[in-house]
Amino acid sequence: MYTVIHAIAGYFLLLLTVRVLVRRPGAQLTPFEFVIIFLIGGVIILATVGNDHSETNCTCAIITIGLTHRLVSIVRSRLPRLAAWIDGIPLVVLREGQWQLEQMEGLRVDREDVIAAAREKGLKSVRDVEYAVVERNGSISIIPR
């Protein structure tokens, strides 16, 4: 039971940690997905190099993490506010030619990141961009004029 409680506590701690670290442009996974990857990896490492080499505890912890993730997914789908907190919301960093400096600073997005995303869309200048949005997964979407 000790392992199950620590696995659940670890899940929420890592979810909170990843959420607080703020998204970066170019990321492909949401914080929700990162939690599963890091936590399962950590559990496997602990079972491999820690004091407890029990396959049963490791398997129990991984199953607990998987079931907790499934439960949080179900709750997320029913509570939009929780989903927005866990996954974040898309944020506009360029609106009709105006840089949203406060948003950019909070997300640690540089103008060069937005300009690079515009070039990937085939736009020659930031003047050709109506909106630039940092999506929930950290990628930058460009909406041309």
Image (cartoon, rainbow, N blue to C red):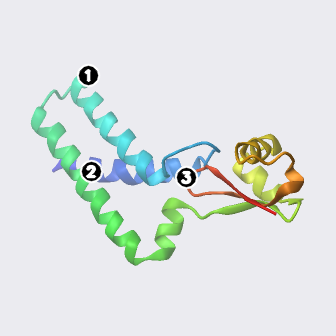
Q: Is residue 23 left or right of residue 3?
A: right
- Lower position in the chain sequence, tag 3 or tag 1: 1
Q: How far apart are the two marked residues, 3 and 2, measured between alpha carbons?
A: 22 Å
Residue at the spot 89% in from the left edge and 60% down from the top edge? 97
Residue at the spot 70% in from the left edge and 51% down from the top edge? 107
- Lower position in the chain sequence, tag 1 or tag 2: 1
Residue at the spot 22% in from the left edge and 44% down from the top edge? 62
Residue 65, numbered label: 2
Q: Is residue 124 left or right of residue 120?
A: right
Which quadrant of the figure has residue 27? top right
Q: Work out which quarter of the rendered image holds the C terminus and state it.
A: bottom right
In the depicted view, which residue is nearer to us: 87 or 128? 128
Amino acid type, callout 3: Asn
- Lower position in the chain sequence, tag 3 or tag 2: 2
Residue at numbered disc 1? 49
Q: Secondary structure at mark 2?
A: helix
Q: How far apart are the two marked residues, 3 and 1, measured between alpha carbons?
A: 32 Å
Residue at numbered disc 3? 137
Q: Secondary structure at mark 3?
A: loop
Q: Position of residue 121 (x, y in %)?
A: 71, 48
Which quadrant of the figure has residue 54? top left
